[in-house]
Image (spheres, rainbow, N blue to C red):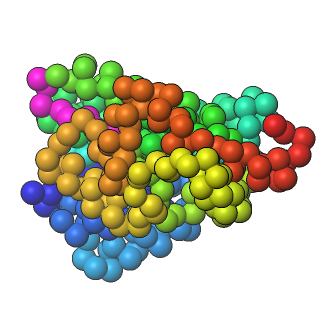
Amino acid sequence: MLKEKVAIVTGASSGIGAALARRLAQEGARVVLAARRKEKLDEVAAALASSGAIAVAVPADVTDAAQAGRLVTGAVERFGRLDILVNNAGRGHFASIEDTTDEVLRSIFAVNAFSLWYTTRPALRQMRKQGNGHIINVASMAGKLGYPFNSAYVAAKHACVGFTHALRAELMETGIHASVVCPGGVLTDWASVTEGGPMLPLFSASGPSIKRIAAERGISLPPVEGLLSADAIAEKIVECIHYPVAEVFTHRGAAEFVRLAAENREKAELHQLPVVLGEREVYRRMKPHGV
């Protein structure tokens, strides 16, 4: 079904983006890969080309509206159409609300939220001409729930979810689909490259405290599947391309937990309490000037 379809994937130099580019290429799509890191991006594109795929690397910073626009118009000029846009570029940060600077706030919203408009606007112009297309925005479980010490990321991913819902409303009966993907934990370098320092040590060090607090208080932790590979997430996204839906939850138990939070936020937060308290203990050790 994807043979000779044209797809743009942002954030394609590693992680979910690179895995998705490989998966789309396997199905015969012509893939335009975009990211800031040219060297890594070229490596992914070269690997795809060596397997016979048509893959084009376009170094671009999608937080810059002009660069994002050229990415989309360049793909259309080269291939004559645009069938799939995957807004996957994103980045987190590591700070309490009090420690989150204005600079970080602007940076996190630029890549996780503002960039959606910068790529989607030119993409829609082409897709409306064609009468078809699919825009997929990669959000996070953080776009549905609250998590501590990365509030700007949580807020920006909520914006990503809201943007997609608004986009779907505008695209009703146009032949163009819009979907949002909400992964849980994924085995990528996301937690190692968060702004404000790597968040990975927080996750690693808080594990014992979380288990202890859960046991002491008799609280069951959120029943959401643990870490998945980037390839597993890519497979879920391709499935959504074949069979479009509004929202994709990639981890077992995620959709149910999000539904619980929507119905009873306090009850969902109780399941999250050991995680919050455990991470708070570690954050205080790592950043004693914070909370």
Position of the N terminus, as image quadrant, is bottom left
- State the residue at coordinates (28%, 30%): 124
Q: Is residue 110 visible?
A: no
Q: Is residue 70 magenta?
A: no
Q: Position of residue 260 (x, y in %)?
A: 37, 34
Residue 131 lies in quadrant: top left
Q: Position of residue 198 (x, y in %)?
A: 70, 57
Position of the C terminus, as image quadrant, is top right
Q: Is residue 5 shown above or below 101?
A: below
In the rendered structure, the answer to whether residue 158 lies left or right of residue 283 reads left
Give the overall secondary structure of the magenta segment: strand
Residue 19 lies in quadrant: bottom left
Q: Is residue 174 shown above or below 75?
A: above
Residue at the right extreme, as displayed:
289
In the rendered structure, the answer to whether residue 241 lies left or right of residue 120 reads left
Between residue 177 and residue 43, name the one nearer to us: 177
Residue at the bottom extreme, as displayed:
50
In the rendered structure, the answer to whether residue 248 lies left or right of residue 275 reads left
Q: Is residue 200 shown above or below 95?
A: below
Q: Position of residue 235 (x, y in %)?
A: 27, 61
- State the residue at coordinates (27%, 56%): 236
What is the number of callouts on the image? 0
- State the residue at coordinates (47%, 73%): 43
Q: Is residue 169 visible?
A: yes
Between residue 219 and residue 19, name the one nearer to us: 219
Tell me which segment is drawn in magenta: 173-180
Between residue 116 and residue 55, name the one nearer to us: 116
- State the residue at coordinates (32%, 47%): 249
Q: Position of residue 10 (x, y in %)?
A: 43, 50
Q: Is residue 178 magenta?
A: yes
In the rendered structure, the answer to whether residue 71 lies left or right of residue 25 reads right
Residue 87 lies in quadrant: top left
